[in-house]
Image: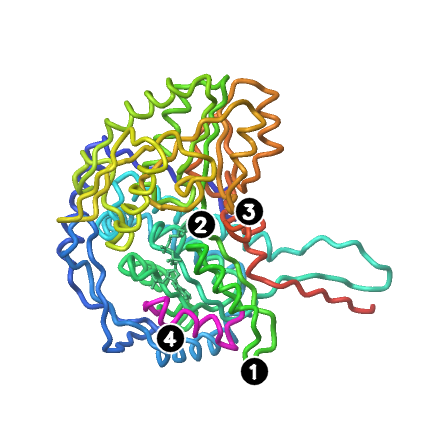
Amino acid sequence: MVGKFRNEAVLDFNVPENKKKMEDALQYVRSQFNREYPLHINGKDVKSGNLFTSYNPANKNEVIGTFHRAGVKEVDMAMAAALEAFESWKIFDPEERGIMLMKAANIMRRRRFELNAWMIYETSKNWVEADADTAEAIDFLDFYGREMLRLSERQPLTSNPGEFNKMIYIPLGVGAVIPPWNFPNAILVGMTSASIVTGNTVLLKPSSDSPCTGYCIVEIMQEAGIPDGVLNFIPGSGSEIGDYIVQHPKTRFIAFTGSMEVGLRINRLAAETSEGQIWIKRVVAEMGGKDGIVVDSEADVEAAAAGTVAAAFGFQGQKCSACSRVMVDESIYDEFCDLIVEKTKKLTVGDTTDTKNYMGAVINQASFDSISKYIEIGKKEGKLIAGGEGDDSKGYFIQPTIIKDIAPDGVISQEEIFGPVLAVIKVKGMDEAMEVANNTIYGLTGAFFSRNKEKVARAKREFHVGNLYINRKCTGALVDVHPFGGFNMSGTDSKAGGRDYLQLFMQAKTIAEQL
Ligand code: NAP
């Protein structure tokens, strides 16, 4: 009997003991910099000899780790190992698989500060953001472990006289798990653990920007008892080996989280049947967002401003759920703009190993350049009222930027920027607010601030996003509290961290036996 699922609380770093442990972990992880990491295939270290490097975005010349890069040969090795391991893993007691995830959750609790430190260095998260990432990863392990216990029980069916009937969930096969860098622990763990606990075996290709965090997870899974060949770690360039993995005839499913462009490519390639392939590949793709907050004339303007600033600039705006457009009723527009500028000016930017800095660097040079380009476009489309500056001399730092008077169809109102840039759009009344709220190709998260119950009810009906928040910010989804996934070009609405999620990694078999 295992206890009920409970969300892991985020640590309070004002507690001196937690602060000290975090400082020690940062020091320890720094002492581990510049190691060389192998691939991990069939329980063994594999070296391809072809190396790539993970850098610290806040100190761009600092090497975090060097990785052997998988090529076609290593993908084939991993696929062979995963296919072989599948034969025994698929019939492994599902309950035991679930328990292994809960063991992994406990190992992660033990290594929590260290994991946070890897993310602080590798992705420039601040301490709280890093710890929230680890807490979410622990939640996924604990929750999916318990979910597997539930799904391995007898499923309810209507009986047919003279027959014994049952329906069981069985795994799919070998899956490719392709996560992004922005939740290098939680999203990687969520997609990987869901794949494994349901009896599949996995080729895990971490993001090239956060492989060290990925490597720690593989160590944790091994320690938890996941057998050789079940989880194969093949870091490498998505643009070099991604298509090969996706098109491989033995790939049964792809669990992807990342940009719309890559997600659509995967979806297209997976739909084509490769020679020797005998199934329709399943694609679970969670993609980009252009998430908006609507501030109605009857909103608590102070609360809306606080929620908008937190959602826009937490982790440098690099969350798929980050608020990047805010639609504000004309009657409170000036007051709201003043408030968000005032709050934003208090935000600190710099190396997040130092807790005085709330925002760190953006992930890499390409990202810095792309965000800077959008800021220039935004300056032409509207009026800059905060930030607008970047400095990539040491790390990739960009000031939290707000541009107001943006037209609903402006570039920075429509395209995902994935950085600390907020477009403010003036709207008049509820009709226009709802129209503009839904006028992008995405549909991931959104928030609506109003004290008017009828307007709230209307927003619940009309605001077309996978995760809608009322009178609170649009970031910070919790496992099994806010199952997460988006509509339209934001993806397949898989609802990660929800009770329907594991079924995406299984197929149901119905057996009717004549008595
Ligand atoms: P990305 O560039 O699309 O990369 C995501 C993953 O795909 C990486 O592991 C990448 O490998 C790999 N990849 C690249 N090209 C590939 C190909 N042709 N075939 C297969 N895999 C390929 O996204 P990102 O920059 O890491 O993450 C940011 C994006 O993720 C944003 O758009 C954000 O909104 C989205 N996101 C969505 C959610 C959600 O739940 N909806 C959550 C988090 C993030 P390399 O690193 O080697 O290129």
Which residue is located at x 55 percent, y 28 percent?
432
Label 1, on which residue?
Answer: 276
Q: Residue 124 or 102: which is nearer the viewer? A: 124
Q: Which callout, 4 or 2, points at the residue further toward the start of the chain?
A: 4
Q: Is residue 316 above or below residue 501?
A: above
Quarter the C terminus occupies: bottom right
Which of the 4 image quadrants contains residue 325?
A: top left
Q: What element carries label 2?
A: loop
List x then y, in percent, for residue 395.
17, 48
Q: Is residue 29 above or below residue 34?
A: above
Check residue 240 for magenta coloring. yes
Q: Residue at x 57, y 58 (%)?
A: 504
CA–CA distance in space, label 4 to label 3: 37 Å
Q: In which quarter of the image is ligand 1?
A: bottom left
Q: Where is residue 37 in the image (x, y as percent from the top left)?
A: 23, 68
**Which residue lies at the image location 19% right of the left edge and 58% below the top edge?**
64
Mark nearer the viewer, 4 or 2: 2
Which numbered circle lies on residue 42?
A: 4
Mark 4 and 3 residues: CB-CB less than 8 Å, in contact? no
Q: Earlier in the sequence, mark 2 or mark 3?
A: 2
- Find the distance from the CA under tag 4 to the CA under tag 2: 33 Å
